[in-house]
Image (tube, rainbow, N blue to C red):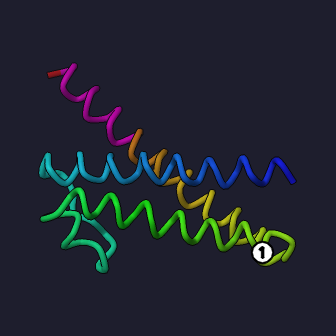
Amino acid sequence: MQWLGWIVKAILVMNILDAFMTLVWIYSGRAVEANLFIRDLAHHHPETFVLAKLLIVAFGSFLLWRTRKSPLAVIAIFAAFLVYYFLVIYHLRALNLRLLQRWLT
């Protein structure tokens, strides 16, 4: 199940990308944090936001990894991967549109 370990590592990397890109959008005035539980942290305490986000996802990934023999845990790992994959794609697409917009004007 080494391939599953790579998927979990990808989740952790994409979580980091999501955290920092979220801060870029928040502090550029182009977005607000969608998660109500950590919105205040993201907008007023960015270091704590990043730390909390990384710890929550790392802890969840650790729990899923520990129970990886369960089909439900494997499904949850794939679901988390897909969520972060699409979030990163969303961030990159938005970034590309912003850069393209600046280049054209």
The answer to which quarter of the image holds residue 50 is bottom left
The C terminus sits in image quarter: top left
52 and 28: which is toward the camera:
52
Majority SS type along the magenta span: helix
The answer to which quarter of the image holds residue 38 is bottom left
104 lies left or right of 78: left
Q: In this view, does 78 lie above or below 28?
A: below
Q: Is residue 16 above or below residue 71?
A: above
Residue 51's spot in the image, x, y percent?
Answer: 34, 60
Range drawn in magenta: 93-104
The answer to which quarter of the image holds residue 101 is top left
Residue 85's spot in the image, x, y percent?
Answer: 56, 51
Q: What residue type is labelled 1?
A: Thr
Residue at 70%, 62% (x, y): give it: 78
Q: Does the magenta stretch include residue 97?
A: yes
74 and 2: which is toward the camera:
2
Q: Mark 1 points at which residue?
A: 67
Residue at 52%, 46% (x, y): give it: 13
Residue 57's spot in the image, x, y percent?
Answer: 51, 65
12 lies left or right of 70: left
Residue at 21%, 69% (x, y): give it: 41
Dot 1 surroundings within 10 Å: few (below 14), some, or many (20 or more)? few
96 and 81: which is toward the camera:
81
SS type, badge 1: loop
Residue 62's spot in the image, x, y percent?
Answer: 63, 67
Q: Does the magenta stretch include residue 98?
A: yes
